[in-house]
């Protein structure tokens, strides 16, 4: 559950139950991280349809070219036939020709457009005004040697000189984490600076059998090119380490691709991801030909135990499929570009010094050549698998990397978008191959090779809290639900003012992306909003959700068409805070959106005239128009229940006190369990995080605000509880926190 720390929100409602009773929390504020995006000029687009339906439409972007590679225009829906594996021809229900070059002539370049109208507006979709499909350049330092990165760098600088001025491009770098160097822009100066900063020296583990400086090679050389049981065991350990390190790279790469898919999902139409990389092998073969010294009675295999022949092998097909499924669902076509270009076998270069061991057939010259060729083929097989699954194309064995990029941009400039609802398909998660044919002679088609028949409702069946947590954990903000957030100037006595550290934000959500379920003939919104409160290192966070589910009248929905669904949040930032992240979940579909904003903005806008300011600090408006009963999310008490008995930690009046049927020995442990117990445990007399990536020490400052008598603070990190503020703390509450303090310091079982 969630810890109550010094950043415990001003708006917080918490109901705590004992035993099997539920725990519900609604809080703000939060602080987050990720690269800031260029803000759009306008709020999220209004809905065109009153309802978002739950049908599963398979969308296929088809690139049609002639024998010279030029796009073929003028085809109709009747000119295409779509086949779904084992289910025959399918009826095309959606069809359009996308001509981005024609639209681009009518669309202004991003560089010439203002970043916002008036004060700053932060959005999770920064290029929604553009007709040209956005393109992400992913410079993969995690899987690419620095010398190959340098070659890519030179080609990219040449490419930027020839790019059309209306092509929005973003530059990402993949190390052990994903970094946004430059958000979407058409400014060549910004892009050149981003490419200049894209080089990253990374330690990439190679196959130890081909490393003349490995510990096993050195040991064999010292033994006169003969192996011993010790060196053979060392070779086995090195191979195991190589597999583990490669697996980490695969996990980090595929996770980054899934994050990019979520980031691009909200942008309409086809998007390009150009992946500059040497990639990773689609699988690692067992090392059955390594090691062995017949003169010493050693087997030529390093895995002599039956059943362990494949111990140091690995297959990454499933990981790649997970990434490509997310990318295809987001209509992202991946164009892998082999950063090595056209090169000879590495064994013939001056950087290699192969070790020849007459007792080790795996270390022979022929074996090394064969193995290195196989590794390159396996890495390129990964590229091919990603490209074919997403409708892109691999660029390999060529030094014309800039030409590869231009070909990808040409593909997205003119293509056909086909859609069909599969007939007779069981949504069992199995892969279905797609085949598209054209009746026009000489037309060449390229498209995604299939889809996974996953249950469309599976995402919505997951825990809302887990989905919101994932939206906060992702490096990039998700865009399936378009959002904007704007810092709002607060007023005192009709004069603008900003309290130190406190900021008011206006969050605007596009209703077109939300599912309005039918509720007895009326519409009902099932929406949750969360703020992500990160620790000082920004490597872990606490989640504070707010549920704004409600019926939606026709008049309210019509208002949302022009204004969007709006909510107000107050946030008190610490000096070291940098960003705050808002995450939104459409519970009915499982779709999420997230947006980042600065924790200490320097520009503020006025509150829209149709939104009256909150009556008092701690009141949040959950909709854009006056509601019969505004949603008040400020808590005034915590309730503890066990069976028919209950007690409360109460600050609704002129004091903070504990009262009810349950004793402190029941209430205090329940409070501790929710606040700290699920994330920390006692070890050697102090709380230790269960998650090694979580903060090593929890926050021990609690804040309680009374609507009439000020606030009280409780510090639990010293030698005894320390109380402050203007709200008196009753002796019953002091006894309560004395018990909590003992639990926090592992002095109470």
Image (tube, helix red, strand yellow):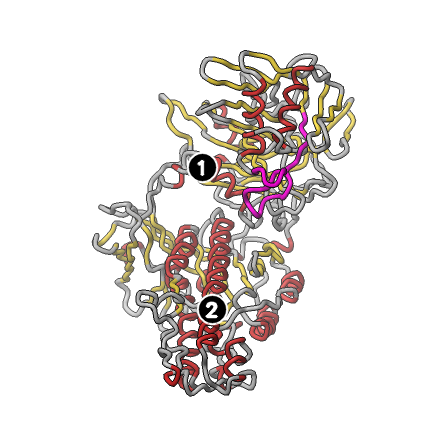
Q: Is residue 689 magenta?
A: yes
- Residue shown at 45%/28% (left/top)? 525
- Relative image position of residue 27 (x, y in whole percent): 59, 29
Q: Which mark is residue 96?
A: none
Which marked residue is nearer to the observer: mark 2 or mark 1? 2
Asked whether, in this view, residue 123 is left or right of residue 448, the answer is right
Of callouts 2 and 1, the N-terminal one: 1
Rendered location of residue 539, percent (x, y): 61, 47
Q: Is residue 157 left or right of residue 370?
A: right
Q: Nearer the viewer, residue 264 or 740?
A: 740
Residue 194 or residue 709, whichever sits in front:
709
Residue 173 appears left or right of 598:
left
Q: Look at the image and give the residue range highlighted in magenta.
A: 680-703
User: Dot 1 corresponds to which residue?
Assistant: 48
For the residue pair 242 and 653, the one nearer the viewer reads as 242
Q: Could you tell me if residue 636 is visible in this image?
A: yes
Label 2 to label 1: alpha-carbon separation: 60 Å
The location of residue 739, given as percent across then percent down, is: 63, 24
Residue at 53 percent across and 76 percent down: it is 214
Number of the label disc, if any, that sits on residue 237: 2
Dividing the image into 4 quarters, which one contains the C terminus? top right
Dot 2 surroundings within 10 Å: few (below 14), some, or many (20 or more)? some
């Amino acid at each position: 559950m969630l810890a109550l720390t010094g950043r415990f929100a001003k708006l917080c409602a918490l109901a705590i139950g004992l035993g099997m009773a539920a725990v519900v929390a609604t809080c703000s504020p939060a602080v987050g991280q990720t690269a800031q995006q260029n803000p759009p000029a306008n709020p999220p687009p209004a809905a065109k349809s009153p309802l978002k339906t739950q049908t599963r439409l398979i969308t296929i972007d088809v690139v049609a070219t002639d024998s010279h590679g030029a796009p073929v225009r003028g085809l109709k829906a009747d000119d295409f036939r779509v086949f779904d594996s084992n289910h025959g021809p399918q009826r095309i229900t959606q069809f359009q020709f996308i001509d981005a070059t024609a639209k681009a002539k009518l669309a202004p370049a991003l560089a010439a457009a203002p970043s916002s109208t008036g004060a700053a507006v932060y959005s999770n979709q920064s290029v929604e005004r553009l007709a040209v499909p956005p393109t992400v350049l992913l410079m993969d330092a995690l899987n690419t040697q620095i010398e190959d990165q340098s070659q890519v760098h030179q080609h990219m600088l040449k490419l930027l000189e020839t790019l059309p001025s209306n092509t929005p491009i973003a530059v990402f770098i993949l190390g052990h984490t994903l970094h946004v160097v430059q958000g979407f822009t058409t400014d060549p100066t910004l892009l050149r600076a981003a490419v200049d900063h894209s080089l990253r020296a990374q330690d990439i583990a190679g196959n130890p059998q081909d490393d003349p400086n490995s510990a096993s090679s050195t040991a064999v050389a010292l033994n006169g090119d003969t192996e011993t049981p010790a060196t053979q065991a060392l070779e086995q350990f090195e191979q195991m380490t190589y597999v583990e390190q490669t697996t980490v790279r695969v996990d980090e790469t595929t996770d980054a691709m899934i994050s990019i898919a979520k980031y691009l999902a909200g942008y309409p139409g086809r998007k390009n991801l150009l992946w500059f990389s040497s990639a990773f092998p689609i699988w690692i073969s067992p090392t059955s030909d390594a090691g062995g010294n017949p003169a010493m009675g050693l087997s030529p295999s390093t895995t002599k135990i039956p059943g362990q022949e494949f111990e140091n092998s690995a297959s990454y097909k499933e990981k790649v499929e997970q990434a490509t499924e997310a990318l295809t669902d987001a209509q992202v076509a991946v164009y892998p570009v082999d950063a090595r270009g056209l090169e000879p076998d590495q064994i013939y270069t001056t950087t290699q010094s192969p070790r020849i061991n007459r007792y080790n057939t795996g270390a022979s010259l022929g074996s090394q050549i064969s193995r290195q060729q196989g590794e390159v083929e396996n890495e390129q097989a990964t590229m091919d698998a990603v490209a074919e699954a997403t409708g892109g194309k691999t660029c390999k064995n060529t030094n014309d990397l800039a030409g590869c990029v231009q070909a990808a941009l040409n593909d997205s400039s003119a293509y056909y978008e086909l859609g069909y609802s599969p007939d007779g398909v069981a949504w069992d998660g199995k892969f279905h191959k797609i085949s598209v044919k054209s009746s026009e002679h000489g037309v060449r088609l390229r498209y995604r090779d299939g889809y996974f028949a996953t249950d469309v409702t599976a995402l919505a069946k997951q825990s809302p809290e887990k989905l919101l947590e994932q939206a906060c954990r992702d490096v990039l903000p998700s865009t399936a639900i378009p959002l904007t957030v704007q810092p709002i100037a607060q007023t005192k006595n009709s004069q603008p003012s900003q309290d130190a550290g406190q900021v008011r934000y206006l969050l605007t959500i596009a209703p077109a992306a939300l599912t309005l379920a039918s509720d007895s003939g009326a519409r009902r919104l099932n929406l949750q909003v969360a703020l992500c409160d990160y620790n000082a290192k920004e490597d872990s966070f606490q989640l504070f959700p707010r549920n704004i589910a409600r019926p939606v009248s026709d008049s309210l929905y019509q208002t949302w068409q022009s204004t969007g669904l709006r909510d107000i949040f107050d946030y008190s930032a610490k000096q070291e805070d940098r960003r705050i992240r808002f995450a939104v979940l459409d519970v009915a579909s499982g779709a999420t959106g997230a947006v980042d904003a600065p924790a200490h903005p320097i520009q503020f806008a006025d509150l829209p005239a149709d939104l009256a300011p909150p009556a008092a600090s701690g009141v949040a408006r959950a909709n854009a128009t006056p509601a019969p009963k505004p949603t008040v999310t400020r808590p005034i008490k915590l309730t503890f229940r066990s069976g028919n008995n209950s007690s409360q930690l109460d600050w609704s009046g002129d004091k903070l006190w504990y009262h009810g049927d349950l004793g402190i020995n029941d209430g205090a442990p329940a409070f501790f369990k929710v606040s700290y117990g699920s994330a920390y445990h006692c070890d050697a007399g102090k709380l230790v995080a269960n998650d090694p990536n979580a903060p090593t020490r929890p926050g021990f400052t609690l804040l309680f605000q009374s609507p009439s008598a000020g606030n009280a603070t409780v510090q639990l990190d010293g030698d005894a509880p320390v109380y402050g503020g203007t709200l008196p703390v009753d002796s019953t509450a002091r006894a309560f926190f004395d018990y909590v303090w003992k639990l926090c310091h592992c002095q109470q079982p």
